[in-house]
Amino acid sequence: MDFVKVWESKWNEALKLWSDYVKLTPAKFLFSEDEEKEEGLTASFAAIRLKDHRVLLSVKQIKSYQLEDYALEILGHEIGHHVYCPGDLADQAKLIYITNLAMPRLNHLTSMIVNIYEDLFINDHLKKQNHLRMEEVYQKLGKQKDPFWNFYMRTYELLWALPSSTLTEGSLSDQIQSDAALVSRMIRNFPNDWAKGMFDFASICFPYFFGENNQINSNSIKILMDTIDAGKGMTPPSGITEVEISSELFPMDGITGSKKALTPAEYSTICKSMGIEADISEITYRYYKDKALPYLVPFPERKTSGAKEEILEGNDLWDPGSPIEKINWMESTIKSPIIIPGYTTVEDVYGETTSNEIKVNPIDLDLFVDCSGSMPNPQNDLSYLTLAGAIIALSALKTGSSVRVTLWSGEKEFLVTDGFIKNEKEILKVLTGYFGGGTCFPLELLEDQYKVEPKRKRHILVISDDGIDTMFTQSYPRDPRAIVKNALEKANGGGSMVLQLYQPNKNPVVIELQQSGWEIYPIQTWTDLIKFSKDFVERNYVRNQALR
C-alpha cells in the first residue's frame, strides 16, 4: 500500500494526539517539484500554512529521507504548530519580534530560530505525552558536525534521557553542554507560556552565528524549517503593537522585564519575516488601527427631541422620474398582473407625526493633519499625530459619522479622502501617508467644501504646530480670513485646533483664530496628543451639549 494512503488514514489519529476536538483540513501531499514550488515548499519536507490551516507534505523528500514509517510523528508535529505553538499569526509575530531584539544584526536568521524553538516544545510534548519516536526522525536526517546542530540535538538528548551521541556527533564542548542543559530546563519550565523563554533561547543561539559562524552550514536545519513564510497570503496581524519581553538569563535594561512598544518599521519587519506580502500602506494601516483601538472615545452627537415619525398613509402612482426603489411591487402586482411603469406601478405615501423619540444626529468630522518636514514619518516611527487622528476618526465612525481626512504639507501638496466617507481603511491609509515637505495649509479645500451649508453638522479638527499660521500668511487669491470664518460657520459643528506651540500666548495668528471661535488646544510634546484625544469630547461637547 502506498505510504501516502497510510498517512491519509492516520490523519484523524494524529489530530487526537492533541485533542479529540481538533478539526483541520487533511494534509495536502505534493507529488512533484512543480507542485512544491507552487505551494512554496522548497527546503523542508513539510510545512504549515496559517492562512487556511493547512499542512503541506513533500512526497519526494519524505521518501528521500526514508521517513515513510513516521506518519504520526510528522503529522502530529505539523498539527502541533497549528494548535499549540505558535497556534496563530499573532503569537508567531511576537516570537519573531522578541528574537529580533535578542539577535541584533542577525535578523535574517530570526524565522529559523523561532522555528526550531517551537519544534522543541512540540517534539517534547509528543515524546513525553504520546511516546512517539521523535528521536528516530532526527536519526533519519543524519548527524552533523555543525556546533549549532549539535547543541540543538544535545538538548533533545537531555530532554529525553538519551545516551550521548544518540543524535550528536563527536566530542561536545563545555559551552554546548551548558547551553543544552539551560534550554532543556527552559522547555520544561514554560510548556504553556513559551513566549517567556524566547528571548533567552535566542540569546543562547546568538553566539553560534555571530562573526565567522554566521552562516547556516547544516542542510538538516533547513530541512526542519516548516513555519517559514507561514503567514504568506495573510493580512498583517493584530494585537502586537506592544510585546512583553521576559528574561531570566540575559536581563537588559530597556528591553527585558516590561512591555515594549513596536515602531511601525519593526512591525513591517515582522510581517516580512512571516512571508506576509502586504504593501507598506496596508501594514501601516493595520498598525495604527491596532494602536488606536484601546483609546476610542464616544464621538459627539446632536440629539433632537420630538423627532418626526413617519406613518404610512396609502399608495400613489409611481412616476418614472422617482427612484425605482420606491415602487411597492406587491401593491403594483395586485393592481395589475402586467407591470407598466408609470401606469400600474404605485409607491407608498407617508405622513409625519410628532413622537417622543429622541433622534441622534452624528456630527461628521473634517480632519486636517499636518505632515510637513517637522513631523515624524508614520511609516517608520510612531507618529502621535497619526495616532490621535486615528483615535478620533475611528471614534467618529463608531457613532455613524462620516469622515474626511486631509493630509497636508506644502503648497498644493495634500492627500484627501474621496469626500466624507465611512471606510476606515481608506481613512487610515490617507492618515498614514507622508509628504515631509514645506508647510502651507490647504485653504482651497475649506473654500470648496463650505460654499454651501452641508446637510449634517461637521466638526473641523486641525492637528499641526506653529505652521498653522500659514492659514493666514500664505499668498492666496482670496481673503483667507473670510474663507476660514465661512467654513467654521457653515460647518455648524464647531472647530478645534490641537497645536504644538512654543509660545502659545505670543502667536498672533493663533490668538486671532481663538478670538474668532476656534477652540485651541496647545500641547508641549506630540505624546500629549493621546491625552488630547481622550479629553476631546469632554472639553468640547459633553459639558455643553443640550437637547435641541
Image (tube, rainbow, N blue to C red):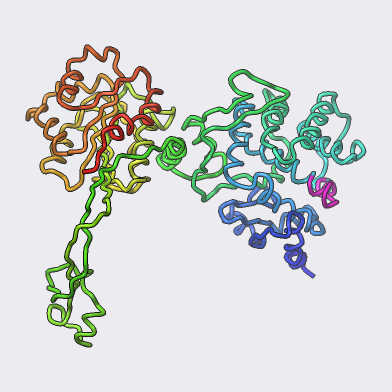
Magenta range = 125-138
Q: Nearer the viewer, residue 378 or 397?
A: 397
Q: Residue at x 54, y 32 (%)?
A: 242
Measured along the vertical axis of the image, is residue 145 above or below residue 32? above
Q: Residue at x 61, y 31 (%)?
A: 98
Which residue is more in the foreground, 474 or 261? Answer: 261
Q: Is residue 6 left or right of residue 475?
A: right
Provide residue 349's location: percent of width, then percent of height: 17, 70
Q: Is residue 109 magenta?
A: no
Name the image quarter holding the N terminus.
bottom right
Q: Is residue 326 above or below residue 450?
A: below
Looking at the image, the residue that sits furthest to the right is: 163
Quadrant location of residue 100?
Answer: top right
Q: For residue 30, say whether it is visible.
A: no
Residue at left 26%, top 79%?
A: 330
Q: Residue furthest left?
A: 478
Q: For residue 288, which quarter of the picture?
A: top left
Q: Residue at x 57, y 32 (%)?
A: 243
> Could you tell me residue 466's position as x and y percent?
25, 19
Above or below 518: residue 26: below
Nearer-the-camera pick, 68 or 409 = 409
Q: Position of residue 449 (x, y in %)?
A: 16, 41
The answer to whether residue 424 is visible is yes
Number of labelled discs? 0
Main SS type for the magenta part?
A: helix
x, y percent for residue 190: 74, 36
Please give left or right for residue 64 compared with residue 55 in the image. right
Residue at the limit of the structure toward the front, as seen here? 356
Quadrant location of the C terminus?
top left
- Front residue of 456 and 106: 456
